[in-house]
Image (cartoon, rainbow, N blue to C red):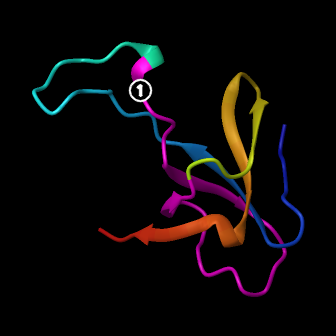
């Protein structure tokens, strides 16, 4: 299934990271925080959006709506909830 966001929205896929403490201990599932980094999957039709598909972004912690497409977790967020783009 393909999802195309409308307006100034993005469809992003959270990047799951192995939760570890500062000392290197792997934390249980319920102790980890919600991911804040994601890959841009689809872009809406807004004119002011300055990221492209495949970019890695940092987004506001509790923003967007979580959706499941073909057993994969995605988040549909407003462009304004993107805080930064990670450049390599």
- Describe the element under mark 1 as helix, strand or loop: loop
Q: Is residue 35 magenta?
A: yes
- The quadrant holding residue 79 is bottom right
Where is residue 10? Give x, y as percent. Answer: 72, 61
What's the magenta region? 31-60
Where is residue 72? Give x, y as percent. Answer: 67, 28
Where is residue 57? Give x, y as percent. Answer: 50, 62
Looking at the image, residue 56 lies above or below residue 83: above
Looking at the image, residue 82 lies above or below residue 47: above
Residue at image coords 13%, 25%? 24
Horizontal side, residue 73 vs residue 78: left or right: left
Where is residue 30? Give x, y as percent. Answer: 47, 16
Horizontal side, residue 43 vs residue 6: left or right: left
Say which residue label 1 marks. Answer: 32
The quadrant of the picture occupied by the C terminus is bottom left
As drawn, the residue found furthest toward the left would be 23
- The quadrant holding residue 70 is top right
């Amino acid at each position: 299934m393909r999802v195309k966001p409308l307006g100034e929205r993005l469809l992003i896929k959270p990047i799951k990271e192995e939760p570890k403490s500062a000392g290197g201990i792997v934390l249980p599932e319920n102790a980890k925080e919600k991911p804040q980094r994601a890959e841009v999957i689809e872009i809406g039709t807004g004119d002011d959006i300055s990221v492209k598909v495949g970019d890695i972004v940092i987004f506001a912690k509790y923003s967007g709506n979580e959706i499941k497409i073909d057993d994969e977790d995605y988040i549909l967020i407003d462009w304004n909830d993107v805080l930064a783009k990670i450049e390599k």
